[in-house]
Image: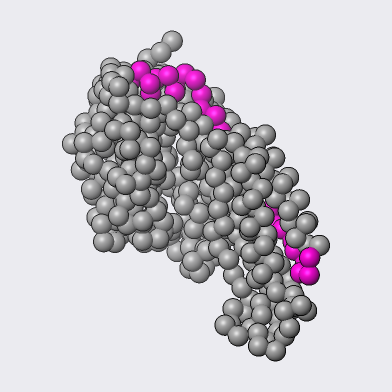
Amino acid sequence: MIRANTDRVLRDLYHLRSIGTYRTGVHRPTLSAEDMQTRHWLAEQLQAIGHETTIDGIANVYGRALGDGPVVLSGSHIESQNHAGWLDGALGVIYALEAARAVAEAGIPGGVDVIAFADEEGHFTEASFLGSESFVGDVTEEMMDRSVCRSGRGRLRDLLAQAGLAGRPRLAIEPDRYKAFFEAHIEQGQTLESEGLQIGVVTSIVAIWQYRITFEGAQNHAGTTKMAIRRDAGKALMQLWQRIEEEFPKIVGPDSVWTVGRVTLDPGGPSIIPGGAEMIFQFRDADQQVLDRLKARLFALVEEAGRGPCACTIEIMGESKPAIMYEAPQAALIEAAKTYAPGKYLVMPSGAGHDAQVIAPLVPSAMMFVPSIGGISHHWTENTSDEDIALGAEVFVDAIGRVLSAD
């Protein structure tokens, strides 16, 4: 059995919290100066334990364990959302680093390769999980050429050059090298906290399917255009939104969720009938049949809306794949939870997307949650108690040790 040094885990997490501090959280968007500072810090920590370490051409940080024996891959992401929490992503990276240290210090055969993926938070276009999708070969050079920062900081290529990464090769996963992949994360929900639990062992990770729906009507004066002849794109959008809310509950699964995350009216003046309207709509589920059913119904509703006074079109923005976690590493997390948190763990699905779902088709993968206070995430008030962070590290490191020592 290998043990986590929980004081070291907390020290490292609080150090990362000091880089890009924003109120009680952090602001470390991908390829910002603060983000690159954390990546270089992580590379130094991995080099200190003898790992062969690199930051590749898309900003993934990778530490490769040297020597003989079985190997586990572990990690998460290290950048943050804009003005967001200090643990989202960073927790999983530090747990992975601690597992690598603990295995090295124990002197047992094998090791832990550590990876901090770039841009899981989606600051750049062209990929939902830029770093992990690059790692598995799903990001082309043409995609990188087209990729730009969603916050207006510029082109991906230019920001990579500013970070000193231009021209570096991009790493490629070696699936046969690994017995398993492990990722840890805050829950980003209230299930664990509300039930008085401390560990979540993830069974599956949802797919996120997102669409841009656009209406084209006729812009006109709000005071002089009779209601009977209006082609109001905003009204058409709201009617479709209402139809979705009527129809989706009839066909969803028990864990399905859906959201209209953004509505835009053009030109958006208080005395102008909108000639254009756009909504960004997404739904999530881990069941492929449910996903297909929801998509079919959405497209049928869009076609129905287009038979009204305004033209209606739909564009696919992203359709990620659901991922089922693998039995053996998942069982190792459960056994470790029984040891350190008896009666305080839950086997549960993930309602948020994670890099593990990209790795899972190639390497047997497992994921673990610790509680989020108040269920808050993607906001600077995000937090988890030191007690739960420390316990999570114990469970996570122990589970990796179990996999490395298994026949």
Please say if 266 is above or below 378: below
Magenta stretch, residue numbers: 308-336
Residue 194 seen from this side: yes
Q: Quadrant of the N terminus?
A: top left
Q: Residue furthest bottom?
A: 224
Position of residue 376 in the picture relative to residue 325 (left or right) = left
Camera-side residue: 295 or 176?
295
Camera-side residue: 160 or 227?
227
Residue 360 seen from this side: no
Q: Residue furthest top?
A: 407
Whole-percent x and y of residue 115? 42, 39
Position of residue 159 in the picture relative to residue 334 (left or right) = right
Whole-percent x and y of residue 47? 32, 39
Position of residue 278 in the picture relative to residue 327 (left or right) = right
Residue depicted at 49% across the width and 58% down the height: 123
Please say if 380 is above or below 184: below
Camera-side residue: 318 or 46?
318
Find out whether residue 305 is within the magenta segment: no
Camera-side residue: 281 or 176?
281
Find out whether residue 321 is within the magenta segment: yes
